[in-house]
């Protein structure tokens, strides 16, 4: 353990912490507004508790030098894959999919923590790789296959839960790593070609409701009471907010339950209705600051592994924000992935705080060399 | 060993040498991390920052478009989401007779509406079962309304039974079938037994065809509109303005708060010129017959009674017409849907003779003393035309010719006049033209002339046709309302008010003709004789009332066809006509009656007599200073013919017996 290496809390990225907490505060307020008078009315203080726990987890992750964590990647990977396999056997059926595991009475979503493992895995693989990043050749096909395979295994397991949304969040981490390490454009072209060939085949691999979601994304009016309902109602809610918003607890779409789950995946819809375009720009600005701060840390990272870690976190969070915020206005398909730091729910909060802990971890050790 | 594996070997050797010289370790080789330089990635991180900025810009623009550009639209959609609008249907105006007695009323009924937005396929069977409908019927109704905005509910069933109302009330809660909505509506109640059926008309859901017409442009699918008769003619006045309640609901359909309520504006009541007493008498007189009666007030053009038989039951028509009933109505040649009073076009027969007489006197073709010898027939243009009385009337003048309806006299007069002058006068009186009565689909009738024949049949007029036209045969046809109006205006001295059924209807100024009073008087005297001097209409005589009139019996087929023997007995029967008016001077009422296959006008005359008698009986009864003579027996309360299920119908009406 290399705990002694970190310097002082003053070296932490405090602006990052500030932005994170601001987003959390907005989230808690919106959860309160959207759930008062419903069976989820206690979600807001649960969220506060979870934020507290999340901060603790962040602190815990900061304590252990990230190189030590990278050294445990094989173990973490094996444990993750085993847990996902185990989940297929003992996982409880929640919302029609096996993604929750019950430990000490609380539900945890294993796939959320696998995100961290994927980030560590990619960082370690790429930083140890010979010749990567020299800018001349980029990644060799053999490394691409190996790393791709290592990421694909948990991705497929999560997809089979079935939880397409979370599974898809692993891929931007991989993509981010590959693009940073450098890749011949021919490989990119071949990859794109393969994807276009695989996509139609993948259609048959999708579950019925997943297909419905895709069709709905393309044409929500087709089934306004079924799969398209959420998207239509969400878009109406966003538009209803106008420039200044309806005000807290005043959004009719939110308050009269036209939005199905206004405190989890569709919290940004409820927020957009009650806070308007001004609020949307403010919060999107916070997320942008968050990402820029993480990218800044990547640029100051002491080594490649630290850089890959930060950028993995940045890529994953960007993907989350793009898909969730885009979905709420019908620009992205409904995949059921939460908005980081805002959506009500512990698992995602914990994993995001732990990711931010990784970033802080890298930051604290930037002068180590 | 292949070159492939050789190269592989070289590669691994190179790797090993790098490892030994302090180079990078391979992934998961257990080799410790090297302190490497991440600066190579800096430009790529900057690229990431730009990409992230672009993505955030994309998101902000997306929200700008939805919230700022389309904000208004989305606010409206959100409003519609939370506000449920339930219509309050406006009751249609009543139809009242001239004394304010109700002819047509509306009563409350319940309909069930289906919200398409909330409809779930799996509810179909249960809903269909509860409403006693076939599931397919519901689907058909939904399909029918597919083009309307989805948030508008669809009427599933009207006239719910108590059991169905209970079903909807107990199942329309948010947890069961929130898509069902009970709506109070109104149902028309019409007189029973088809009384006044053709005049009143009926209502039903507006048809696709109507919606495309200009008159119904303002209506929407599902609206109840008049389909026939006055209901159609005055639909715009009778319909009210629907109100609505707006309720705030949540997404499960639970009502949270009533926003506002706009009461319905009931339609305007229409006071008709019809007199229920006269109408009832005329209905009873025609019961079981095939024909029509029209009673007008020639001083105003008001229609006092209008009957067409056979009729149909309006109460069935304003509801759901069963296939059986429809078949019953449309099968055979009875054609109960036809309003014979304005749509039957038949040769007027001898009822045409008074008009010919006036034309001849006015043109100076004859004077009132013109007389000739009737030998029971006469030759014109090489053809023998027989008189009604085969033995001949002998020496006969205008007065007796009218009284006894001598054909030879009018053959001769008509021949002297010529068809064009007959047509000129008949047209002046209104023959061959629509009267313009306020009912839809009035027929025109026909008054032939030389020009008409050339224009329509592209043939020259055959002089023999003039002889037929002179006694109201040949091509000339009239409708009962046309005949009543023509004769009524003529005997009033040449003033024709447009016949109308609604009191105070805008009928414009009357048509006038300069007719010499002595000529009218001469013809009126003749018509008085028809009834009161032992003429053909003697059966219409009423003590104390100067009822005058003219009988008519018109062949329905040409003589040639008649002789061919190809026709059944029914077709061979003549149509019977009678047109009568009273009093002789300044008539107050003119009645035209037609019985198809009624053989002779003499058999029709009693119908007119009954109507005229009830008119004067009522007048006498209502006159405040009446002292002379015993008061006539009050007319049968015709109210009994009207109304609700509980009202008893006189047995004789059911039996179809004439009083």
Image: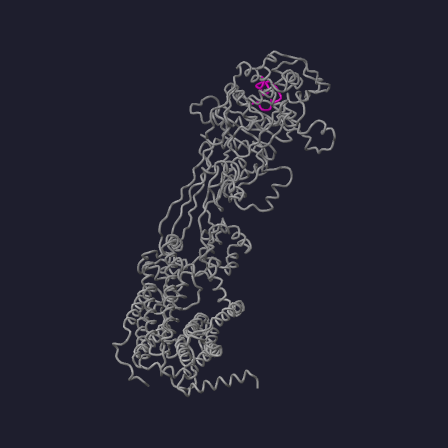
- Image quadrant in which the C terminus of chain A is located: bottom left
Using the rendered view, name the quadrant where residue B316 is placed: top right
Q: From the viewer's perspective, is residue B96 above or below residue B162?
A: above
In the image shown, does A362 or A115 lie closer to the viewer?
A: A362
Q: Nearer the viewer, residue B340 or A259?
A: A259
Residue B208 to residue A310: above or below: above
Region in magenta: B526-541
Residue B476 position in % (x across, y down): 62, 25
Instruction: Residue at 52% x, 56% y: name it.
Output: B128
Look at the image and say whether residue A23 sits in the magenta stretch.
no
Instruction: Locate residue B59 relative to residue A212 in the image: left or right.
Output: left
What x and y, as percent, mark residue B537?
60, 22
Query: Residue B533 lies in magenta, yes or no?
Result: yes
Quadrant, the N terminus of chain A: bottom left
Magenta span: helix, strand or loop, mainly? helix
Q: In the displayed image of the protein, which residue is found farthest to the right?
A: B564
Q: Is residue B54 visible?
A: yes
């Amino acid at each position: 353990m290399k705990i002694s290496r970190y310097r002082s809390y003053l070296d932490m990225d405090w602006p990052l912490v500030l932005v994170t907490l601001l987003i959390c505060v907005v989230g808690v307020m919106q959860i309160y507004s959207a759930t008062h008078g419903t069976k989820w009315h206690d979600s807001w203080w649960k969220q506060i508790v979870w934020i507290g726990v999340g901060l603790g987890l962040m602190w815990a992750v900061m304590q252990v030098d990230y190189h030590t964590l990278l050294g445990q990647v094989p173990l973490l990977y094996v444990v993750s894959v085993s847990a996902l396999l185990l989940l297929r056997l003992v996982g409880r059926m929640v919302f029609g999919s096996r993604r929750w595991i019950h430990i000490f009475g609380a539900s945890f979503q294993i796939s959320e923590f696998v995100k961290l493992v994927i980030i560590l895995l990619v960082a370690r693989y790429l930083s140890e790789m010979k010749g990567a990043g020299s800018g001349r050749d980029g990644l060799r096909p053999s490394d691409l296959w190996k790393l791709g395979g290592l990421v694909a295994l948990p991705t497929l397991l999560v997809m089979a839960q079935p939880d397409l949304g979370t599974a898809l969040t692993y891929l931007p981490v991989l993509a981010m790593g590959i693009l940073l390490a450098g890749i011949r454009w021919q490989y990119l072209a071949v990859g794109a070609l393969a994807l276009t060939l695989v996509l139609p085949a993948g259609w048959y691999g999708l579950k019925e409701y997943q297909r419905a979601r895709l069709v709905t994304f393309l044409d929500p009016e087709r089934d306004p009471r079924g799969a398209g309902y959420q998207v239509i109602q969400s878009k109406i809610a966003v538009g209803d907010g106008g420039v200044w918003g309806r005000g807290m607890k005043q959004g009719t779409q939110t308050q009269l339950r036209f939005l199905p789950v206004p405190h989890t995946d569709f919290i940004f819809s409820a927020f957009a209705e009650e806070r308007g375009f001004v609020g949307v720009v403010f919060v999107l600005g916070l997320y942008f600051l968050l990402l820029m701060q993480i990218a800044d840390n990547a640029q100051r990272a002491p080594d490649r592994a630290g850089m890959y870690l930060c950028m993995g976190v940045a890529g994953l969070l960007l993907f989350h924000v793009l898909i969730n915020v885009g979905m709420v206005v019908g620009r992205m398909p409904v995949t059921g992935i939460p908005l980081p730091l805002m959506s009500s729910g512990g698992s995602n909060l914990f994993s995001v705080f732990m990711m931010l802990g990784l970033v802080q971890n890298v930051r604290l050790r930037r002068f180590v060399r | 060993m292949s070159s492939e594996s050789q190269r592989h070997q070289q590669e691994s050797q190179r790797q090993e040498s790098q490892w030994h010289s302090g180079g990078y370790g391979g992934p998961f080789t257990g080799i410790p991390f090297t302190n490497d330089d991440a600066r190579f990635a800096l430009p790529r991180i900057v690229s990431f920052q730009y990409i992230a900025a672009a993505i955030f810009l994309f998101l902000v623009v997306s929200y700008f478009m939805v919230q700022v550009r389309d904000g208004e639209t989305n606010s409206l959609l959100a409003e519609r989401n939370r506000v449920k609008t339930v219509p309050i249907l406006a009751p249609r105006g009543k139809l009242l007779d001239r004394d304010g007695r109700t002819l047509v009323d509306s009563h409350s009924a319940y309909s069930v509406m289906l919200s398409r937005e909330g409809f779930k396929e799996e509810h179909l069977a249960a809903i269909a079962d509860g409403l006693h409908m076939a599931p397919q019927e519901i689907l058909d109704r939904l399909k029918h309304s597919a083009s309307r905005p989805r948030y508008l509910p669809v009427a599933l069933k009207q006239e719910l039974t108590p059991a169905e109302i209970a079903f909807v009330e107990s199942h329309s809660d948010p947890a069961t079938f929130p898509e069902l909505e009970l709506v109070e509506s109104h149902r028309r109640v019409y007189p029973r037994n088809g009384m006044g059926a053709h005049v009143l008309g009926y209502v039903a859901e507006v048809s696709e065809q109507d919606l495309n017409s200009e008159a119904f442009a303002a209506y929407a699918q599902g609206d109840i509109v008049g389909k026939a008769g006055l209901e159609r003619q005055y639909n715009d006045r009778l319909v009210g303005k629907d109100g609505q309640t707006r309720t705030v609901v949540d997404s499960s359909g639970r009502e949270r708060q009533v926003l506002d309520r706009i009461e319905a504006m009931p339609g305007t009541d229409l006071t008709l010129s019809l007199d229920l007493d006269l109408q009832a008498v005329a209905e009873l007189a025609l019961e079981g017959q095939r024909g029509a009666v029209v009673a007008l007030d020639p001083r105003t053009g008001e229609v006092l009674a209008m009957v067409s038989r056979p009729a149909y039951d309006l109460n069935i028509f304003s509801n759901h017409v069963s296939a059986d009933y429809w078949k019953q109505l449309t099968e055979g040649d009875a054609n109960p849907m036809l309003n014979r009073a304005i749509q039957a076009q038949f040769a007027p027969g001898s009822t045409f003779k008074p008009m010919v007489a006036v034309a001849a006197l006015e043109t100076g073709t004859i004077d009132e003393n013109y007389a000739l010898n009737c030998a029971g027939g006469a030759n014109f243009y090489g053809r023998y035309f027989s008189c009604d009385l085969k033995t001949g009337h002998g020496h006969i003048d205008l007065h007796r010719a009218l009284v006894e309806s001598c054909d030879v006299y009018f053959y001769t007069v008509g021949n002297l006049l010529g068809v064009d002058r007959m047509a000129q006068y008949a047209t002046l009186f209104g023959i061959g033209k629509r009267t313009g009565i306020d009912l839809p689909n009035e027929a025109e009738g026909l008054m032939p002339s030389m020009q008409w024949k050339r224009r329509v049949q592209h043939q020259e007029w055959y002089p023999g046709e003039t002889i037929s036209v002179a006694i109201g045969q040949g091509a000339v046809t009239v409708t009962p309302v046309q005949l009543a109006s023509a004769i009524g205006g003529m005997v009033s001295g040449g003033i024709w008010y447009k016949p109308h059924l609604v009191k105070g209807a805008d009928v414009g100024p009357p048509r006038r003709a300069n007719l010499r009073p002595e000529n009218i008087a001469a013809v009126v005297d003749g018509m008085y004789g028809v009834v009161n001097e032992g003429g053909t209409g003697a059966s219409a005589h009423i003590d104390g009332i100067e009822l005058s009139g003219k009988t008519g019996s018109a062949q329905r087929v040409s003589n040639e066809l008649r002789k061919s023997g190809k026709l059944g007995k029914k077709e061979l029967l003549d149509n019977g006509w009678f047109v009568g008016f009273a009093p002789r001077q300044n008539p107050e009422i003119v009645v035209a009656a037609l019985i198809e296959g009624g053989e002779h006008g003499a058999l029709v005359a009693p119908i007119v007599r009954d109507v005229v008698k009830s008119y004067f009986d009522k007048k006498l009864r209502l006159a405040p200073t009446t002292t002379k003579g015993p008061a006539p027996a009050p007319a049968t309360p015709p109210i009994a013919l009207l109304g609700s299920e509980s009202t008893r119908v006189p047995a004789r009406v059911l039996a179809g017996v004439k009083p």
